[in-house]
Image: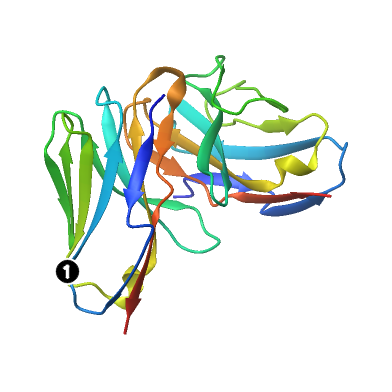
Amino acid sequence: KQEVTQIPAALSVPEGENLVLNCSFTDSAIYNLQWFRQDPGKGLTSLLLIQSSQREQTSGRLNASLDKSSGRSTLYIAASQPGDSATYLCAVFRGGADGLTFGKGTHLIIQP
Amino acid sequence: IAGITQAPTSQILAAGRRMTLRCTQDMRHNAMYWYRQDLGLGLRLIHYSNTAGTTGKGEVPDGYSVSRANTDDFPLTLASAVPSQTSVYFCASSEQGSTEAFFGQGTRLTVV
């Protein structure tokens, strides 16, 4: 069974810092990995999708990398802002009946 | 663009009652999913549908049923609600299973 782990579970940093969120998964046979943002009481917003054949994807201040063979992904946030405060979720898609398998998230607080 | 619409937004339901959570998407996506999100357990797949007319069971399907009569709608039914079904329910869709997934805003269900 695929398991996804996110470290750290929570993170609080001052505004302006660059930071890295980590995601690891146990089964490297995935089609893609997706990073989401979830604000309190809200749905999930897709941030970045990395296909299994790709090494990284970038969107604005966000950069996500994927090392499929080692079962790891990182989400890099540059020049963090208070508006980046949210829970960040990593999910992998393996196909079939699994749908997306999610990690439990990293709760991020950016201090003004 | 509405994306994915879920209804109701929240509901308090007496145990033993029947309830249908509605999900409609306007992106003409083939694949649709239902997840539940619980504190400490993260998001778990309940049921999925890869295309209209087909459905499948996810990780936690017991007590739930789905149908997919057309491309746009994917209702989730609780035949006889129990308190352990208290959760936040998210509907999601993707063009195919391996492409970017988009989520609705969720339905917060409390079974008392």
Residue at horizontal 62 percent and vertical 20 percent from the top:
B69
Q: Position of residue A93 (x, y in %)?
A: 34, 29
Amino acid type of the residue tagged 1 in the rendering: Asn
A37 sits to left or right of B82: left
Q: Position of residue B18 (x, y in %)?
A: 83, 35
Residue lying at the far left of the rendered structure: A55
Residue B70 drawn above or below residue B93: above
A58 sits to left or right of A36: left
The image shows a total of numbered marks equal to 1
Q: Position of residue A106 (x, y in %)?
A: 37, 57
Residue B99, image quadrant: top left
Q: Badge 1: few (under 14), some or many (20 or more) residues near its Cα, within 10 Å? A: some
Q: Position of residue B58 (x, y in %)?
A: 54, 24
Q: Which quadrant would the N terminus of chain A be assigned to in this image?
A: top left
Out of A100 and A107, give the one closest to the viewer. Answer: A107
Residue B36 drawn above or below residue B9: above
Out of B13 and B82, give the one closest to the viewer. Answer: B82
Q: Secondary structure at mark 1?
A: loop
Q: Which quadrant would the C terminus of chain A be assigned to in this image?
A: bottom left
Label 1, on which residue? A18
B112 sits to left or right of A43: right
